[in-house]
Image (cartoon, grey):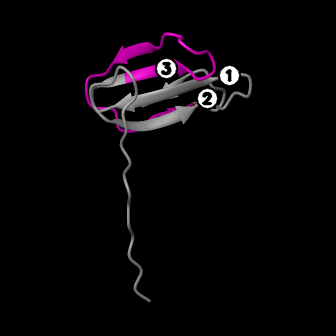
Amino acid sequence: NDFKTIILFFFFFLPGNEGPVASLAFSPTLASSALASVSWDKTLRLWNCIEEGTEHETIQLNSDGLQVAYRPDGQEVNI
């Protein structure tokens, strides 16, 4: 059997990003509406997904963001 692996990358833009968003992660905490995103514009952004019109926190990175994940308790993100 000859299996071939196809890897698909989907990049998209969120408001305020100057480059494609490479990864999203929702907080694993049930009571939280937090979303973290990293982008090729060298930013980590923390969003509130429920409240319309809320500001997001932007953290400048030293290199392009490729992957983001929350710690299981939802208190920190890993990039």
* Residue 79 image-quadrant placement: top left
Q: Is residue 63 magenta?
A: yes
Residue displayed at 40% across by 86% down:
2
Image spot of residue 51 (x, y percent): 62, 15
Mark 2 or mark 1, which has the lower sequence index? 2
* Residue 27 image-quadrant placement: top right
Q: Decide: marks 1, 3 in contact (CB < 8 A)?
A: no
Q: Nearer the viewer, residue 25 or 70?
A: 25
Q: Secondary structure at mark 1?
A: loop
Q: Is residue 47 magenta?
A: yes
Residue displayed at 49% across by 10% down:
55
- Mark 3: give few (<14), some (14-19) or many (20+) Cα within 10 Å: many
Image spot of residue 69 (x, y percent): 51, 35
Q: Decide: marks 2, 1 in contact (CB < 8 A)?
A: yes
Label 3 amino acid? Leu
Compared to residue 72, the image places residue 16 above or below, namely above
Outermost bottom residue = 1
Mark 1 or mark 3, which has the lower sequence index? 1
Q: Which residue is mark 1?
A: 32
Residue displayed at 34% across by 32% down:
65
- Mark 2: give few (<14), some (14-19) or many (20+) Cα within 10 Å: many
Q: Which residue is mark 2?
A: 27
Q: Quadrant of the N terminus?
A: bottom left
Q: Which residues are magenta?
A: 44-70
* Residue 7 image-quadrant placement: bottom left
Image spot of residue 45 (x, y percent): 43, 21
Q: Secondary structure at mark 3?
A: strand
